[in-house]
Amino acid sequence: MRHHHHHHHHGTEKISADLKNIYIIVIVLIALYIAFEAWMGFRHNALTLVSDAGHKLIDVFSLSLTLITFWLSTTKARKNYTWGFRKLSVIISLFNAVLVVIVAVTIIWESIEKVIEPGDLAPDGGAISITAAVGFVVNCIAAFLLSLKRSHDVNTMGQFIHTLTDALVYVGMVISGFIIKWTGLAVIDPVISILIALFVLFNIWSVLKESFRMSIDGVPSSVHVGELLDQVRAVPGVREVSDLHIWPVSTVENALSATLVLDDSADRTAVTDTVKAVIKTCGIENSFLETR
């Protein structure tokens, strides 16, 4: 159970300058690549490159939002915002996931039209392979930089996995470029475009589900309620746990409130302190406990 605690504990620390710099370098790298990929895609009539540039544009947006999220998760309480603006990080995460779905569905729709009505489809296979090879290198560099801090929080781990899977997508694009060049099978271009979009949808689904759950104050997937209750009930002096509520404060911080029914002979302060320590090991920073 302790590994859950690890992620959440670091999330509330002040974000290090190192991590901010890594994000900024990765954002600039990918933004430069997008400009190059979109230019190559339009110039060489390659739908695969244009659709991937659209997908990468979302990556830049997502990385930028993660940077903002880090700042939001450290905002202090104010009079009318007692948790600061931390919950915005969850809303941003949900917005980002919905945006990815919209773009991926649009790409699939346009690509299917191209498969049905190829028209003047004549992509340059060599251009696709060269551009994808550059993309592979860029993503490997980005994945390496993010891997240095991947244990910091759930967002950074997600970005690391995403850049790594993108690198694999580029290997497929290099191969498809060669096939188009050798066989002249232009229909491979929109087909690969559809596969990329489906791959993106597959990857974003868990993020979409988790973001939605957290936005309506559902229990974050990193917290296992059954295990938590077992551990709390195992504390000497605790008879029962009632009125349990667990909710996310931000993408990196959780809270819990509950009523503890204690044995008559139990030392309330000692038992409460022990229970709070147990709750903390389950990845919940803030706990509010009443005793009866």
Image (tube, helix red, strand yellow):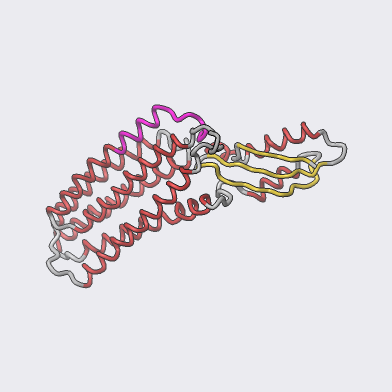
Numbered marks: total: 0
- Report the side of 65 relative to 243 (left or right): left
Measured as percent of width and height from the top left, residue 185 is found at 17, 65
Please identify the quarter of the rendering in which residue 198 is found: bottom left
Q: Compare residues 102 and 204 and report the one nearer the observer.
A: 102
Main secondary-structure element of the magenta-colored stretch = helix
| Camera-side residue of 201 and 167 | 201
Q: Is residue 266 left or right of residue 66?
A: right
In percent of the image, x 38 and y 31: which residue is there?
20
Q: Residue at x 60, y 37 (%)?
A: 285
Q: Residue furthest bottom?
A: 116
Q: Which percent across, then down, holds residue 228?
A: 67, 45
Quadrant of the rendered structure where residue 146 is? top left
Horizontal and vertical percent position of residue 242:
74, 49
Q: Position of residue 217 (x, y in %)?
A: 56, 50
**Which image quarter: residue 268?**
top right
Which residue in the rendered view is the most extreme toward the top?
17
Image quadrant holding the C terminus, namely top right
- In the rendered view of the protein, which quadrant contains the N terminus? top right
Q: Nearer the viewer, residue 228 or 215?
A: 215
Q: Is residue 191 magenta?
A: no
Q: Is residue 73 above or below residue 190?
A: above
Q: Please name the residue shown 48% across and 29% down the image.
A: 14
> Quick one: which residue is furthest to the right in this view?
265
Look at the image and say whether residue 14 sits in the magenta stretch: yes
Q: Which region of the structure is painted magenta?
A: 10-27
Height in image: 119 above or below 17? Answer: below
> What residue is drawn where x is 46% and y is 43%?
88
> Is 2 rendered above or below residue 130?
above
